[in-house]
Image: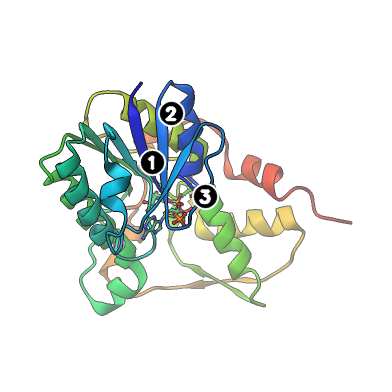
Amino acid sequence: MARILVTGGTGTLGRLVVPLLRDADGKVRVLSRRSREPADGIEFVTGDLATGDGIEAAVAGTEIIVNCAGSSKGDEDKARNLVRAASRAGTRHLVNVSVVGADRIPVVSGVDRAMFGYFASKLAAERVVADSGLPWTTLRATQFYDLILLTARAMTRLPVVPAAAGFRFQPVDAGQVAARLAELALGPPAGLAPDIAGPKVYEMAALLRGYLRASGKHRPIVPVRLPGRAARAVRAGANLAPDRAAGGQTWEEFLADRVGPPAR
Ligand SMILES: NC(=O)c1ccc[n+]([C@@H]2O[C@H](COP(=O)([O-])OP(=O)(O)OC[C@H]3O[C@@H](n4cnc5c(N)ncnc54)[C@H](OP(=O)(O)O)[C@@H]3O)[C@@H](O)[C@H]2O)c1
């Protein structure tokens, strides 16, 4: 039985990866910043990747680490703390999740950093993993439907909804990403794996309109042109992977599941 640590095993993606690895006969441990009782054959350990607290104990004895922990900032520092502990523990496979476009969206100016700093931190984290000396795999995914839903909900609270002009997204079902990640984790280290992306490319306004329709809300959507090189790269499609479109749910199907028909 492989001993596997899933960091971020309480998050949108990690929560879907954990049962797949457990059911594949893995002995799974989850790292979280909050303490939890063991449940469904899963052990929980407390630690914080940003500070490094508890990480040595979390990785001790694990052969495979699947790094699903992340936030909008500082993922390179979290990766550094993880890699340091994993190197001492003799981990034989470190699996990392990144974002499609991390290497194609230039984050140069303050404006770029304010809006797209996340992409720079994911690229920096990728480099920490690749330079770690540990056997590694990185999978870049496009945005999960859950994130688009969260964003659409927040934006449509405004009376008028701004949509970045020319921005397109190719969102993906987190379940599809979880399945691919679990498969990669149990296979040999693959380096940079082929990207994973959703089945369809949508204009940002179309994603918002889909949400408004599904939730029975009415809001005007106004296009806003975002400045900077990173935004220009996104307008050119740097965040898309049309040749890596996975099957699975479309945005409309996800909305039908999660938002349901508007209340009468
Ligand atoms: N969401 C997307 O659209 C998307 C697209 C492409 C790639 N990704 C990448 O996929 C990964 C997972 O994303 P997600 O959407 O599942 O994130 P999420 O739902 O926000 O979950 C984040 C997870 O990270 C853990 N975490 C955050 N900061 C931590 C810290 N300092 N120490 C330890 N654990 C920490 C959280 O655990 P606790 O709160 O329990 O501590 C939680 O389980 C991230 O690397 C993200 O960049 C996401």
Specify the amino acid type for callout 1: Val
> Around disc 1, counting alpha carbons within 10 Å, would you say few (fewer than 14), some (14 to 19), or many (20 or more)?
many
- The structure residue drawn at horizontal position 29% and vertical position 33%, both measured from the top left corner, is 64
Q: Is residue 249 above or below residue 71?
A: above
**Residue 211: % across, % down:** 65, 56
What residue is pinned by disc 3?
36
Q: CA distance from mark 2 to mark 3?
A: 19 Å
Q: Please, is residue 170 above or below residue 76 in the view?
A: above
Q: Residues within 10 Å of mark 3 (few under 14, many from 20)?
A: few
Q: Quadrant of the C terminus?
A: bottom right
Q: Secondary structure at mark 1?
A: strand
Task: Give the labeled residue for mark 2.
Answer: 21
Q: Are marks 1 and 2 in contact (CB under 8 Å)?
A: yes
Label located before the other in sequence (3 or 1): 1
Residue ID for mark 1:
6
CA gap between label 1 and label 2 equals 9 Å
